[in-house]
Structure formats: structure tokens, C-alpha cells
């Protein structure tokens, strides 16, 4: 792996009554796609928001660091963080239907981010916006600048979101469930687009998803999260070929669609028996209550991530 | 994806559509009010005779004949509608002058009062609502929320009287009534310059209730909008919270406020009856109350018609503002 | 009021709402104020025996001037405190009766138009629009002038001009609910329209109606006081608004005559608004949780 | 022929007793020319000429522009205005007026007897009271331009008093051309021309009326004031504040809340005048019974009610002392007519109870006798009604007060006759035949006609007295008839007289001669001036 663009180390996110992300560490290298996968409530979206400095009002970073481009984002002033958001880190969200301001033209929403970070005239920004729309393969880009969000389809809107996210040539693109709300055919197009931008612009991509199919198809490396903790970190190939953590195994095998390493069809995570435990309430492994192979120790002692290979780590004493 | 709503024909078409929609309402209002008013005991002849303090039976008959009150109700209605179709609102029996003249003389003061009150209510209400939303759940929000509830609960005429007690009687800072200095000091530029002193208390009394509504609505609306996905997007773009609030949230949050403002135009005219009475403000509200007492139905009909049109016009305005604020709204 | 039917209709959510309501300090403050006013209204004859319009003392005693009349006397030597106590009856009675009237009309019109839709809806909505277009306080003054001003006229008059808001609300709820499965089921069971409207749909449409009712009571009290202030009230009953109206002439010399009853109107209206807010938050936790 | 000519008199004689504060009348100082006077009236007038209406504001404003033949001293002695001489024939059937020479209307047209004839005949036709006041006027002959001869069908001893500017304005005939059938519709009502000391300039609806000095006035160098602004100020407290702040120079007809009077009187910048109401603004409050009502057809019930009343309390509480007790049918302000010997039903609750027992309304176990409703318009009348409710409660009579606005009240009392008794204020005008007879004369029981005989009182004795007094030319005999009338009514109580109000006029101390006769602020203001211009 190259020098990491994003380096998260021992991250704890705390609410007054809960700690939904604990001791999370991973890196994203330049030009790499890292997928963070987990059920809803696993803390993956919070992690993305923490990177953006957009945690909900009552949440805070209780421990750890988020290093980006050599700086620890957790220690930045709000003003400095603003320059990073949209400038050096772009983000796209799950709901393209609602993520655009309904009362602002597409063009205005794109030029806004350009002028915020790069300055310049509205005229220049409009030109750049048209280029961006072209880049995300929106037909007739100049005319679309004056379109309203409601006049575009969901896929088109997500392309606009992407255009906005990459407008200022960020080095990291966070895609939080970017295709969940879209049709299957559109999903592939959008991810293909993101992947192309990664390749062409050398952007690192942090893909947040609960869709194993996407992970299998698009990710270079994968972080499997459960109840706020990383369970397994591995290369995508390696993970799907041989998941080590019982949770990962459960995920992959419990899926009726699990057909070979890259044979996953797109779709949400399969059901695993039991409920997602509260990360805060347990002293031991959070997966222990549902774990088919849990040891007596697992309920009382929290397993640390341990390296199984050069690029493979797992938080399970049982895993081999 | 044609952007028809930006076409040149938008405004006239909208007007035409609204007028068409308003027509049955206006007809309904005319019929309803006309016959409704005739149920009121006593007629203009009674009022005039009572005003005069004396009458004879021949005089009463002559008076009724002169006022057309001796004819059948249907005939009178027919004549009234016929007049209306010719844009003739009839004569005021109390003032013995064309109704249209009376309305024109009173309208400017009422419009001034209502526009000022509404401006105060909207401007301060939005600012107050934004402040509350900004500090949602914290002390400033709680204090302002209580204040808004106080404004919402206090009778306008009473706050008017109390303002008079404080600012006119005790402190002597502001006049206690009237729409300008008594006599000719109220003419010309001098009159315009002192007008705000006369306008302040009545418009505050009239506007306070609406101010509280807009403050509460803005707060709720801002908070609701603040949770919307596009706000997160805007923040993710690196915009400052200020810019996000003013450029993104506010415009969306104002949509329900504009709807309300449109709905309140009529209600405010109703409130003007009381406030204009308290402050001796020579406007339509006071005129309409006098018209009821003196059974001057032509005047009352005209005011009700005018206010109906005002309400409809306000709806048109709101639709236009909505169209400007929200591109999703299109003609169907 | 309709609280009883509502709570039974929403039994599962009801107790939770009640708990939320009782935990809301504003709502509890509102309940306390209202309880005080209710107490005054119920026990008025014990608290201030006799006709409050009786001239009992020298006119224009200031509050505190004579301990027998703690709030002073008015221009005819009537006890202001007795007027305040008895006036609570008028405010509450008119507020509640007017709201009942407007509930009756508004719910009926809203239910029928919302349930049937089509031309009935169009006619109903036109009616609503006709009533809503002219300023309703002006209409109210006309209504009260037609019949002589007394409690029933004022109450019915206020109800008659304020029902359209409720009609629109109920109509909206009905339109949302009538497509729900349980309504379709009721249809397939061959229930009559009336039964479906009143037994199936209405209870589900009630929560927002309850919240609105509280605000309607507040508005009705405000309207009554404004009417009384203009002199359109029953001269045989003391009402807070009429006390202000009569005290207005003496604003310069005896401002307490207008100030005291005004404070009472304000407090009572505030109480209903606090309760309305509390109910709204309790029944609509999504909104309450936003803070 | 009796010739009444201009006489000298002492302005203050006979009236000084009434004067609260001596106004600045007839001081020897030289009038100052110039300045602007702002007067406040409560209501916007329906018209500016009192030809067609008797509304208060009209009656105040009309005489400034449109003058009358005569004007009147405080004791209603006639003085010349447009007429310089007048004669009444001994049989009382012919009135001859000599008009002043050289009088011009504001448009330059000279005043002629044709204008007088036109005005008087139209007063008979369209003036609300004119129809009865000028009932006996048959015709007006105009032998020459400056002579008008009136012919009456029967004597009208009060008629001379009617020829004031307020009651009988002389309008220019040519201003009514085209409106002969309907003078009410003439634009002259809204923008009048007349012969008066002030010319109409502007009427800002809902706000004020502006008049300016008539430089061609026949009584030069009068008038003295350059302009007269009349502002409509409906609210008594606003008028009070305006007077104190100096924004308002003058207001009449008890313009301020009586509670403010203490302070107004103490204000060195204001003067208070209680005269100038003798002519027509002599408000008189009475309780009127409907004799068709089951209770009140019995005189004992009416007397019982009268025995419960202490009018001094009403005077103190409702009128704050600004008035006179007036128990009979005639107001004491008509000094030549009022009989102070009129008997009074004194406060006597025992007697009242006994009368009700006698009448067949004994008290039940709870002390209750019967329930009855009193009608009153909001305001002072309603306060009197509240007083009645208070004083009748101990007698076991539960009174319900009904307040309706003017029109509904008039409809109920006079047309529908759906009332038991009422509290009402009305003007007694300048003579009982004009102002008082209407309430008690059986011929004037006319359902549908406001301010007629609402009691439905029918007493042949009273009818005879009133009818005789209406045509009696001998003042002494007439006084006897009217005294007898007052005595009968006082005992028969178709109505209980209560209070004759003092109508207060308040003026800035700077104002001189704002009240120079019985018309008070309804005078023409020719003599009015500002001390400092």
C-alpha cells in the first residue's frame, strides 16, 4: 500500500449515552477503493461523518485520530475543516432525491462549491461546472446547469452529486451508500463512474455500504464492521475467497446469493440470526452473543485485531 | 425538460387561473353576505332616523323609498348586482357619498397599517424564528419561545391599550391615536415625517399575534429543513453554517411562512376592526364597524368584497412568491 | 371536550402521549393556570357571592386602596375582583361552546368532503372558501349584530366563522386515511358509510383535531374578548372583554380597570396555548424530539 | 302686530349661576385677526348642511357656512342674523322677515327671499324634524328680494325659535338645481356654499374638514380666525389627550371622559364652559315605560319603580355631577318652561313594595316578584340600565339589561315594540312642542317612527294641554298649560325623568368667544378669535 491518504487510528465516537464506534483503525491509500461494510447501526456512516467533521450535534470524537494529508482532522478548527470539506474531501450521499437543494439550480449548486474553495467568478465557475457535468457523463451539460433538481432522474442527480464532490479535485471521495436508492442498472453506471474517476483522477474512495455485491465488485480492500468495531480488514479478493471472522463468514455464507468469490449479486446484507448488540453494553466481543463458535472467554474479553497476513487482520481469537 | 415556468406567460396565466378559481367564491360571498346582512334587525332608515333623533311616519316612508328599502329584497339584490356588474358599488346611506369614494379615502391608511404590521410581523418573526432555531433547545430558544407564546396569547386590543398607557400616557413619547397630527400639521411632507410615530403602536398591536405565528413557524420549519439531506450536502461542500442557513435552509423554510402570510391578509383586516377602533385609526376596519352599526350595507358589502379580492390577490401573490422560491411548483 | 374518545381511540399511543404531556413543564404550567381559572369559574358564587354587577362601594377605588376590594372598584362602584371571578365563566363557557360548535360543523364537513371526495368535496370546499374569504372577525360582528349579543349567540357565532380550519384539517386526514387497508376491509364487510366515517376513520383522524381544539379554544376566547371590548356582549354578564371595553374610557385615570381583566384573558389564552403545544409535542414525538 | 326688535341685554344675566368657569366672553380687548383653530367632533358628519339631517356633527358644523335667519341668546331670546327685522302677526299666522342687505353667498350670488322660501319649504319636506316643526307652514311669499312672508295654517308659538342656522339653515336655491325632488342628493351637502363667516375648502374623509375665513363676510371685519379645522376624533380619551396637548383647541358636547374632568379643570391651558346647550343639545335621560306591557300598564308599578330611584346617585356615578336632577318631562335648561314645582316621587322602598303588592305582584318566599328586561343603547343609557338593575333587585324585580346598537334598538322599541321599558337619552330641543310633546301626545303614538311616543301613552288631559300649548300665543297662558302638563306626567309616570345633562365645552384658554349664545359651538363662530392670533 502507498502512503495512506486517510489514516484512522483508534477512533472512538461517543454520544452522551452510547459509544457507537470504538477503537476503529484503518487506512485508505491513494487511488484505492476501501469499502466499509456493515449492517445499519454498525457505525460505518458515523465514521464517514466523523471524517467530514459532520457528526450530529451530540456526538463527539472521544478518542483516536483521523489523519488526512498529514494533519489530524480531529484537532482542526471549524474554519479549517470547512476548507477540507468539499475541497480536499468530497462526499456523496445515499439519497440523491433529497440531497440536492430543491430550490437551487444544478449549476448554482455546483458553482457554489467551486467558488467556495477555488474562488473566481461565477462565469468561470459555470464553465467548470459544465465540464464537470460532462465529466460525469450528463448529456447536454450546459443546458443542465439551469435545470432544477426535480427535473432530473435519481441517477442523474447522483451524477450531479458526484460532480459536486469532485469539483475541487479532492484526494478522497467518501461515498455513503451511493447507490442504495437507485435502480440496479443505474447502480452499476454510477459506481462505474466513481471507479473511473478514481482511476483517472487518482482519487482515493471510501465506500460505505451494506451491499456485499458492490463490495465484491468494486472494492480493493474491505473493513467489516459490527456494532461499532472492526471485525476484519482484508483485501476484497482475500475476504470473499476466505472470510476469517465468524461474522464475515456468516455474512457471506448466509447469503443465498453467495456464489463464489465475485459472484455476489447486488443486494443488501443477509440476515444473521440474533440482534445487533449494543457496542457499549458489552465488555467482551460484541458479536459473541450471536457467534456460533464463541469461546467462554469471548463474552468477557474483547479480542484485539490481529494480523493474519500482510494485509489481513481479524478481531477474533478463533479465526485462523 | 422544458422550463415552462420561466416562460413569459406565467404571471398572466396564473392570474387568469386564480381569478377563474376565485369567481365562484366571490359570487358566493356576494350572495351569502347580501342576504345575511338583511337579517340584521333595523335598516338604514332606522339608523338615519335614530341619528337624527326624530322622525315622522311620512318621513320614514319617504326615507325608505329614497333608499330603495321599500322594494322587495330580490329587486334590491338585482339592482345591487346590476350595479356591481357596472362597477358601481352604490351610495353610502350614512355619508351620502359614493361608496367607492369612501373606500378610496380609507383604503390608503388601512393598507399602510396592514403593510407595516405585516412587515413587522414577517421580518421580526423570521429573525426571531431563525434565532430560536439557531439555539434550538438552549436558553435563547426557550426565552424567545416563551415570548412568542406570550405574543400569541395576548389580545391585540389589550396590548394596544397597555402600549397607550405606557408610551402615551406615562411616557408621553408616542401619540395615543389617530393616523397623523390633528389638523393641517398632517399635510404634506411634515405629515409623512411624523406618520411613523402614529403608525408604530397600532401596527405593533396588530402585528404581534402574527409575529408570534411566523416566529414559531419559522423555527419549526428551519429545524425541519435543517434535518434535510441537502443541508448535509451543503455542509459537505465546505460552506459555513451561516451560508448554509441563509442560502439553503432559509429559502426552503420560508415556503410555509409565505403560505401563512397569504392566509392572514384577510384575518388581519378583521383584526384591524378592533385595532383601528382602539387607535382611532381612520381605516377600513373602523369604517366597516361603523357601517354595521349604521346599517350602511353598501359600504359593508363593498368592504367585504374588497377584502375578498384582497384575499384572492394575496393568494396570487403567494403563488407567485412560491413559484419564485420553489421551482417545483408548476401550473397544472 | 373530545379527550375521552381520543384516548380510547389511541389507547396504545395514548398512555405514552399522556406521560410525555405530563413531563412537559410548559404543559403542566398551562394545566395549572387553567385549573385556577376553572376553580374560579366553578366556585364563582362562593368566592364572590351575589351579582358581580352590583354597585357595592365608592367608584374608582384603586387596587389595594380598600382591603375589602383588593382589585378596586370600577366607574360604577362594582367590585373588580368579583367581576374577574365571574368573568372567567364567560370566557371558558364561550371558549368551549364555540369550539364545540366549530368541531361539530368542521368535523362533519371535513369528514364528508374528505370521505366522499368528488363533487361533494368540490361543493364543500367551495363553501369553506366562501366562509374563509371575508375576514372572519367582520363576519362575526355581523352575526352578533343580527341576533342580540348574548352568550349562545357569541359562542355559535365564533364557531360559525372558525370551523373552516377544522374542516380542512379533518378533510386532509380523511383523504389520507380512507385509502388505508382497514377502511377497505370495512367496506368489504359491508359497513355503512356512516359507520365507517364515525367508527373507523374518525377516531384515527382525531389526534390533530385534539391539538387544534385547544388552540381553537384560545382563539375563541380572544374573539369573545374582542367582541365584548367592542360592546357586543351580554350586558347582564360580566366578561373580561367588556370590563376592558368599559375601562377603556378611563385609561388615563384608572388604567387598572383595563389592565387587570386583560391579564386574565392573556393568562387563560396562554394556558390553552401551552396545553395545545404540550399536546402537539406529546402526540407528535417526532417534532418534539427535534430539540 | 307685536314688533320684536333688537334689544340690549346683559349677556351674563340669568346664566351666571350655570357657568362653571367664566369664559372669556365680551372682554373689552380688541379681537386679534388670524390663526387657525382645530375643533374636534366625535363623528364624521353625514352632510355639512343641516337641511337634511340633525346628526350632531352636522349641527355643529353647518352654521359656520350656512346661516339662519336668527340666532339666540342664552335664554333663547332671538337676535338678528340674516334677518334684520321680523314681525309676527297677532293671530300668530303670519311671519314677516326683512333680510339683511348686501349678503352674498360664497360664490358671489346675492342672498334673496327666494332662497329663504326654497329653504323653508324644503325643511318642511326633508328635514327630520322639519316635518313637524314646520307642519303648519303653508307657504312663503316673496313680495320683494329682501322680504319673506310666511303663512301658517295655525299658530305655532315655538316657531320663531326654530329659525336658527342649526335648525333652519338658509341654503342657496341655485345649488340645488336639478335636485329639487331630492335635495339630499345635491352635492351641496358635501361641499356647501352659504353666506356664513367660513367657506368650505376640503373634506378629507375619515379625517377632517377644513374651512377658511370668508373675507367677504357681511359682518366685516368678522370673522377673525383664518381657518377652522374640524377633526373627527371618535375616542373620548383621544380627545382628552388632544385637548391637553394643545392639538385640539376646542371640543363640545361633553367631549372627554367625565373622569378626566378633574384634571382638565386644573389645566391652566384649558377653559371649561357648561352653557351653550340651551338651544338643542339639552340631553335629557329618562326611563320610558311601554304602557302596552303587562306590568307597566299599571300606574302603580311605574310609580313603584320611580320610588326606588335616587337620581342623585345616577348624577354622581354616571354623570359625575355634570347635570341637573330633572324628575318631570321637561328639562330645567328650558328655563322659561320648566316648572320647579313639579311633584317628585321620592325614594321610598316601602311605598314601592306596597304599590307592587297592591298591583298584584306580591313578593314570593324568596322575595321575588317578577322578571323584566330593560333596553338601552351601549354607553351612558346602559349604565343607567345597570343602575336600574341594581336598585330594583331589592324590590324583588329581576332586571335583565339588553344592549343593542342604535338601529336594532330603534327597530325594537319603535317598530317591533318588543320592549318593556328602556333607558334613553334624547334632546328636548328648544321648545316642548317640538322636543317634548312627541313623547307624550297620543297622536304621536306611531309605530315605526323613531323617537315618537314609545310609551304608547294616551291621556286625553295631556293631549288637550299639549294641543292647546302648541297654538297658544300668550306666553303666560302657555306656561300654565305646560305646567299642568308637567304635573300630570310627574304623577302618571309614563316615563321617569332622571337627569338633564350639562354638556361641557372645553377650549384652549387662548380661544375667545367660542360660546356666545344658546347654540354654543353650533354658533357661526364669527366672533371667535385667538388671543395671540
Image (cartoon, grey):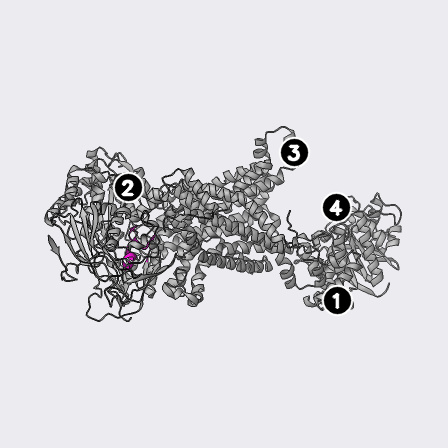
- Left or right, A32 with reference to A280: right
What's the CA distance linking mark 3 and mark 2?
Answer: 70 Å
The subunit carrying tag 4 is A
What's the CA distance linking mark 2 and mark 1?
Answer: 100 Å
Q: Residues within 10 Å of mark 1 (few under 14, many from 20)?
A: some
Vertical arrangement, residue B237 with respect to residue B13, above or below: below
- Left or right, B182 with reference to D103: right
Marks 3 & 1 on one chain? no
Q: Residues within 10 Å of mark 4 (few under 14, many from 20)?
A: few
Marks 3 & 4 on one chain? no
The subunit carrying tag 2 is B
Q: Which residue is mark 3?
A: C184
Q: Which residue is mark 4?
A: A275
- Give the extent of the magenta segment: D41-65
Marks 4 & 2 on one chain? no
Secondary structure of residue under mark 1:
strand
Q: Which mark is residue D208?
A: none
Secondary structure of residue under mark 3:
helix
Nearer to us: label 2 or label 1: 2
Nearer to us: label 4 or label 2: 2
Q: Is residue B15 magenta?
A: no
**Residue B218 appears in view:** yes
Q: Which mark is residue A72?
A: 1
Residue C248 % position (x, y): 36, 55
Q: Residues within 10 Å of mark 3 (few under 14, many from 20)?
A: few
Are the residues tagged 3 and 1 within 8 Å (C-beta)?
A: no
Amino acid at each position: 500500500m502507498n502512503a495512506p491518504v486517510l489514516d484512522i487510528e483508534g477512533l472512538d465516537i461517543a454520544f452522551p449515552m452510547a459509544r457507537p464506534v470504538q477503537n476503529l483503525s484503518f487506512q485508505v491509500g491513494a487511488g484505492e477503493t476501501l469499502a466499509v461494510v456493515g449492517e445499519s447501526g454498525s457505525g460505518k456512516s458515523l465514521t464517514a461523518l466523523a471524517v467530514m467533521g459532520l457528526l450530529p450535534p451530540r456526538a463527539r470524537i472521544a478518542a483516536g485520530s483521523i489523519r488526512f494529508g498529514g494533519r489530524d482532522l480531529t484537532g482542526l478548527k471549524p474554519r479549517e475543516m470547512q476548507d477540507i470539506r468539499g475541497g480536499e474531501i468530497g462526499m456523496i450521499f445515499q439519497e440523491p432525491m433529497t440531497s440536492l437543494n430543491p430550490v437551487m439550480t444544478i449549476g448554482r449548486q455546483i458553482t457554489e462549491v467551486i467558488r467556495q474553495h477555488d474562488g473566481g467568478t461565477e462565469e468561470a465557475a459555470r464553465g467548470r461546472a459544465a465540464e464537470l457535468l460532462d465529466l460525469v457523463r450528463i448529456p447536454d451539460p450546459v443546458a443542465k446547469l439551469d435545470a432544477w433538481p426535480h427535473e432530473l432522474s435519481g441517477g442523474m442527480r447522483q451524477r450531479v452529486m458526484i460532480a459536486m464532490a469532485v469539483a475541487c479535485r479532492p484526494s478522497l471521495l467518501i461515498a455513503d451508500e451511493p447507490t442504495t436508492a437507485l435502480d440496479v442498472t443505474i447502480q452499476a453506471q454510477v459506481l462505474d463512474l466513481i471507479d473511473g474517476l478514481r482511476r483517472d483522477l487518482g482519487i482515493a474512495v471510501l465506500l460505505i455500504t451494506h451491499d456485499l455485491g458492490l463490495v465484491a465488485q468494486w472494492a480493493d480492500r474491505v473493513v467489516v464492521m459490527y456494532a461499532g468495531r472492526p471485525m476484519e480488514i482484508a483485501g476484497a479478493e482475500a475476504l470473499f475467497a476466505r472470510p476469517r471472522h465468524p461474522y464475515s463468514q456468516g455474512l457471506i455464507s448466509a447469503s443465498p446469493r453467495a456464489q463464489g468469490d465475485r459472484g455476489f449479486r447486488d443486494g443488501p446484507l443477509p440476515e444473521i440470526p440474533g440482534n445487533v448488540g449494543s457496542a457499549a453494553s458489552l465488555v467482551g466481543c460484541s458479536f459473541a452473543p450471536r457467534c456460533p463458535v464463541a469461546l467462554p472467554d469471548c463474552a468477557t474479553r474483547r479480542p484485539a485485531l490481529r494480523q493474519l497476513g500482510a494485509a489481513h487482520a481479524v478481531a477474533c481469537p478463533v479465526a485462523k | 425538460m422544458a422550463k415552462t415556468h420561466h416562460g413569459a406567460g406565467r404571471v398572466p396565466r396564473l392570474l387568469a387561473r386564480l381569478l377563474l378559481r376565485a369567481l365562484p367564491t366571490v359570487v358566493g360571498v356576494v350572495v351569502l353576505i347580501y342576504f345575511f346582512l338583511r337579517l340584521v334587525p333595523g335598516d338604514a332608515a332606522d339608523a338615519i332616523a335614530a341619528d337624527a333623533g326624530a322622525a315622522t311616519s311620512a318621513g320614514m316612508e319617504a326615507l325608505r323609498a329614497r333608499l330603495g328599502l321599500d322594494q322587495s329584497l330580490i329587486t334590491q339584490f338585482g339592482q345591487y348586482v346590476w350595479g356591481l356588474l357596472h362597477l358601481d358599488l352604490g351610495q353610502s346611506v350614512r355619508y351620502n357619498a359614493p361608496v367607492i369614494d369612501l373606500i378610496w379615502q380609507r383604503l390608503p391608511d388601512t393598507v399602510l397599517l396592514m403593510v407595516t404590521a405585516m412587515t413587522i410581523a414577517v421580518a421580526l418573526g423570521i429573525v426571531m424564528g431563525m434565532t430560536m432555531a439557531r439555539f434550538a433547545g438552549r436558553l435563547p430558544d426557550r426565552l424567545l419561545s416563551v415570548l412568542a407564546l406570550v405574543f400569541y396569547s395576548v389580545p391585540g386590543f389589550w396590548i394596544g391599550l397597555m402600549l397607550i398607557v405606557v408610551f402615551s400616557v406615562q411616557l408621553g413619547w408616542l401619540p395615543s391615536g389617530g393616523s397623523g397630527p390633528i389638523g393641517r400639521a398632517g399635510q404634506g411632507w411634515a405629515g409623512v415625517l411624523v406618520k411613523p410615530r402614529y403608525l408604530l403602536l397600532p401596527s405593533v398591536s396588530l402585528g404581534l399575534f402574527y409575529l408570534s405565528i411566523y416566529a414559531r413557524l419559522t423555527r419549526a420549519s428551519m429545524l425541519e429543513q435543517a434535518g434535510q439531506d441537502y443541508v448535509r450536502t451543503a455542509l459537505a461542500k465546505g460552506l459555513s453554517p451561516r451560508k448554509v442557513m441563509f442560502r439553503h435552509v432559509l429559502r426552503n423554510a420560508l415556503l410555509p411562512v409565505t403560505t401563512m402570510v397569504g392566509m392572514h391578509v384577510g384575518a388581519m383586516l378583521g383584526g384591524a376592526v378592533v385595532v383601528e377602533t382602539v387607535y382611532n385609526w381612520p381605516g377600513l376596519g373602523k369604517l366597516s364597524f361603523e357601517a354595521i352599526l349604521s346599517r350602511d350595507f353598501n359600504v359593508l358589502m363593498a368592504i367585504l368584497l374588497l377584502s375578498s379580492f384582497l384575499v384572492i390577490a394575496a393568494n396570487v401573490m403567494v403563488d407567485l412568491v412560491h413559484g419564485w422560491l420553489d421551482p417545483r411548483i408548476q401550473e397544472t | 371536550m373530545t379527550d375521552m374518545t381520543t384516548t380510547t381511540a389511541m389507547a396504545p399511543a395514548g398512555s405514552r402521549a399522556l406521560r410525555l404531556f405530563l413531563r412537559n413543564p410548559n404543559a403542566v404550567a398551562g394545566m395549572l393556570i387553567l385549573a385556577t381559572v376553572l376553580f374560579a369559574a366553578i366556585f364563582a358564587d362562593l368566592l364572590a357571592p351575589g351579582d358581580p354587577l352590583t354597585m357595592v362601594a365608592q367608584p374608582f377605588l384603586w387596587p389595594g386602596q380598600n382591603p375589602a376590594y383588593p382589585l378596586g372598584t370600577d366607574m360604577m362602584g362594582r367590585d373588580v375582583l368579583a367581576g374577574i371571578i365571574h368573568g372567567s365563566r364567560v370566557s371558558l363557557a364561550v371558549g368551549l361552546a364555540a369550539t364545540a360548535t366549530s368541531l361539530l360543523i368542521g368535523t362533519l364537513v371535513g369528514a364528508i368532503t374528505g370521505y366522499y371526495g368528488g363533487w361533494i368535496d368540490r361543493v364543500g370546499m367551495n363553501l369553506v372558501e366562501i366562509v374563509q374569504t371575508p375576514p372572519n372577525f367582520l363576519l362575526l360582528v355581523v352575526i352578533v349584530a343580527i341576533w342580540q349579543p348574548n352568550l349562545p349567540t357569541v359562542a355559535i357565532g365564533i364557531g360559525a366563522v372558525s370551523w373552516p380550519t377544522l374542516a380542512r384539517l379533518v378533510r386532509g386526514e380523511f383523504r389520507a386515511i380512507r385509502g388505508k387497508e382497514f377502511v377497505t376491509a370495512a367496506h368489504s364487510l359491508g359497513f355503512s358509510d356512516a359507520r365507517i366515517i364515525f367508527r373507523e376513520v374518525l377516531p384515527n383522524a382525531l389526534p390533530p383535531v385534539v391539538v387544534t381544539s385547544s388552540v381553537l379554544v384560545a382563539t375563541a376566547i380572544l374573539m369573545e374578548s374582542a367582541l365584548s371590548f367592542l360592546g357586543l356582549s351580554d350586558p347582564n354578564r360580566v366578561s373580561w372583554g367588556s370590563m376592558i371595553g368599559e375601562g377603556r374610557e378611563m385609561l388615563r385615570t384608572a388604567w387598572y380597570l383595563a389592565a387587570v381583566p386583560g391579564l386574565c384573558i392573556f393568562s387563560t389564552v396562554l394556558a390553552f396555548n401551552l396545553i395545545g403545544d404540550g399536546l402537539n409535542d406529546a402526540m407528535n414525538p417526532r417534532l418534539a424530539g427535534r430539540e | 302686530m307685536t314688533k320684536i326688535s333688537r334689544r340690549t341685554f346683559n349677556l351674563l344675566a340669568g346664566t351666571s349661576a350655570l357657568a362653571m368657569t367664566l369664559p372669556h366672553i365680551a372682554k373689552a380687548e380688541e379681537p386679534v385677526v388670524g390663526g387657525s383653530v382645530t375643533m374636534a367632533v366625535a363623528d364624521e358628519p353625514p352632510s355639512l348642511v343641516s337641511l337634511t339631517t340633525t346628526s350632531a356633527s352636522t349641527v355643529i358644523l353647518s352654521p359656520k357656512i350656512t346661516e339662519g335667519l336668527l340666532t339666540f341668546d342664552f335664554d333663547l331670546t332671538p337676535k338678528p342674523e340674516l334677518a334684520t327685522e321680523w314681525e309676527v302677526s297677532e293671530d300668530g299666522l303670519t311671519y314677516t322677515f326683512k333680510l339683511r342687505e348686501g349678503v352674498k353667498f360664497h360664490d358671489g350670488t346675492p342672498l334673496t327671499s327666494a332662497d329663504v322660501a326654497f329653504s323653508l319649504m324644503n325643511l318642511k319636506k326633508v328635514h327630520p324634524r322639519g316635518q313637524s316643526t314646520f307642519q303648519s307652514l303653508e307657504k312663503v311669499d316673496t313680495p320683494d328680494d329682501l322680504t319673506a312672508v310666511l303663512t301658517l295654517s295655525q299658530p305655532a308659538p315655538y316657531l320663531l325659535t326654530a329659525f336658527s342656522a342649526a335648525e333652519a339653515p338658509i341654503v342657496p336655491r341655485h345649488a340645488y338645481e336639478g335636485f329639487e325632488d331630492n335635495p339630499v342628493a345635491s352635492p351641496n351637502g358635501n361641499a356647501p356654499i352659504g353666506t356664513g363667516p367660513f367657506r368650505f375648502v376640503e373634506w378629507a374623509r375619515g379625517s377632517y374638514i377644513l374651512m377658511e375665513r370668508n373675507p367677504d363676510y357681511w359682518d366685516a371685519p368678522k370673522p377673525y380666525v383664518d381657518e377652522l379645522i374640524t377633526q373627527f376624533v371618535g375616542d373620548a380619551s383621544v380627545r382628552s389627550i388632544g385637548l391637553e396637548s394643545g392639538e385640539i383647541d376646542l371640543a363640545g358636547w361633553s367631549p372627554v371622559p367625565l373622569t378626566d374632568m378633574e384634571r382638565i379643570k386644573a389645566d391652566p391651558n384649558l377653559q371649561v364652559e357648561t352653557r351653550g346647550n340651551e338651544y338643542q343639545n339639552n340631553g335629557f335621560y329618562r326611563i320610558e315605560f311601554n304602557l302596552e306591557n303587562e306590568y307597566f300598564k299599571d300606574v302603580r308599578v311605574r310609580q313603584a319603580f320611580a320610588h326606588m330611584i335616587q337620581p342623585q346617585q345616577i348624577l354622581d356615578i354616571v354623570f359625575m355631577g355634570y347635570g341637573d336632577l330633572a324628575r318631570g318631562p321637561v328639562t330645567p335648561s328650558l328655563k322659561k318652561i320648566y316648572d320647579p314645582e313639579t311633584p317628585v316621587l321620592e325614594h321610598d322602598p316601602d311605598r314601592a313594595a306596597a304599590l307592587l303588592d297592591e298591583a298584584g305582584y306580591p313578593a314570593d318566599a324568596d322575595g321575588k316578584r317578577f322578571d323584566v328586561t330593560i333596553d338601552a343603547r351601549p354607553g351612558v343609557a346602559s349604565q343607567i340600565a345597570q343602575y336600574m338593575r341594581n336598585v330594583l333587585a331589592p324590590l324583588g324585580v329581576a332586571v335583565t339589561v339588553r344592549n343593542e346598537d342604535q338601529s336594532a334598538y330603534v327597530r325594537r322599541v319603535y317598530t317591533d315594540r318588543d320592549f318593556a321599558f328602556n333607558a334613553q337619552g334624547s334632546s328636548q330641543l328648544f321648545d316642548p312642542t317640538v322636543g317634548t310633546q312627541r313623547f307624550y301626545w297620543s297622536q304621536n303614538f306611531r309605530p315605526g317612527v323613531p323617537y315618537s311616543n314609545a310609551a304608547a301613552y294616551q291621556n286625553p288631559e295631556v293631549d288637550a294641554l299639549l294641543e292647546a300649548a302648541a297654538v297658544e300665543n300668550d306666553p303666560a297662558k302657555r306656561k300654565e298649560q305646560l305646567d299642568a302638563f308637567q304635573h300630570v306626567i310627574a304623577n302618571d309616570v309614563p316615563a321617569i325623568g332622571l337627569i338633564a345633562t350639562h354638556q361641557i365645552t372645553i377650549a384652549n384658554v387662548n380661544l375667545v368667544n367660542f360660546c356666545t349664545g344658546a347654540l354654543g359651538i353650533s354658533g357661526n363662530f364669527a366672533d371667535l378669535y385667538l388671543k395671540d392670533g
